[in-house]
Image (spheres, rainbow, N blue to C red):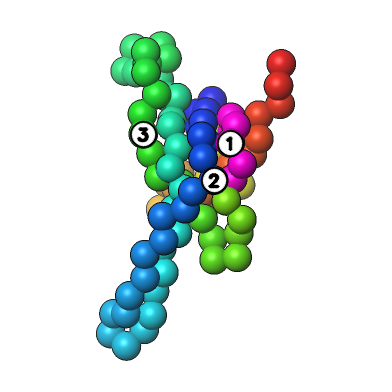
């Protein structure tokens, strides 16, 4: 399981225009707790960006896991990622 730790509700928002069409990117900083090539958890989490949808509020600080609905079967029957969503981890 990939865990993502959110430590702040701060958002990074950028916008502009390309080919006459406006665009906006909203992201929130987090830390991914991932496995190394040996299958063991890496010693330190890795800084990452989590996309935030247009009207979505930022994630609250805490631990999350990838929502299974973020993974799908794409072209040529290959596993692919759709829109990334996080689910809160329940405290043990």
User: At x 39% / y 74%, what residue is drawn?
Assistant: 23
Q: Is residue 39 placed above or below 31 in the rendered structure? A: above
Mark 2 near mark 1, Cβ–Cβ under 8 Å? yes
Can you say which quadrant of the picture contains the N terminus?
top right
| Side of 47 relative to 72 (left or right) | left
Q: Position of residue 4 (x, y in %)?
A: 50, 32
Q: Which range of residues does the magenta coloring cover?
A: 59-64
Q: Is residue 81 visible?
A: no
| Side of 3 relative to 38 (left or right) | right
According to the image, label 3 marks what residue? Answer: 47
**Which secondary structure, mark 2?**
strand
User: At x 31% / y 18%, what residue is drawn?
Assistant: 37
Between marks 1 and 3, how big is the CA–CA gap?
15 Å
According to the image, label 2 marks what residue? Answer: 9
- Mark 2 vs mark 3, foreground winner is 2
Between marks 2 and 3, how big is the CA–CA gap?
15 Å
Nearer the observer, 62 or 87: 62
| Side of 20 relative to 76 (left or right) | left
Mark 2 and mark 1 lie on one chain; the one further toward the N terminus is 2
Can you say which quadrant of the picture contains the C terminus?
top right
Q: Is residue 12 visible?
A: yes
**Which secondary structure, mark 3?**
strand
Q: Residues within 10 Å of mark 1 (few under 14, many from 20)?
A: few
Q: Residues within 10 Å of mark 3 (few under 14, many from 20)?
A: few
According to the image, label 1 marks what residue? Answer: 61
Between marks 2 and 1, how big is the CA–CA gap?
7 Å
Q: Position of residue 79 (x, y in %)?
A: 45, 44
User: At x 51% / y 40%, what residue is drawn?
Assistant: 8
Q: Position of residue 48 (x, y in %)?
A: 38, 39
- Mark 1 vs mark 3, foreground winner is 1
User: At x 45% / y 37%, what residue is drawn?
Assistant: 30
């Amino acid at each position: 399981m990939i865990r993502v730790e959110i430590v702040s509700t701060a958002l990074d928002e950028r916008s502009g225009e390309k080919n006459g069409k406006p665009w906006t990117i909203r992201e929130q900083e987090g830390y991914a707790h991932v496995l190394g090539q040996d299958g063991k958890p890496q010693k330190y989490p890795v800084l990452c960006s989590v996309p935030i949808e247009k009207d979505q509020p930022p994630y609250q600080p805490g631990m999350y896991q990838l929502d299974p609905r973020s993974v799908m079967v794409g072209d040529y029957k290959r596993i692919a990622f759709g829109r990334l969503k996080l689910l809160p981890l329940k405290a043990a």
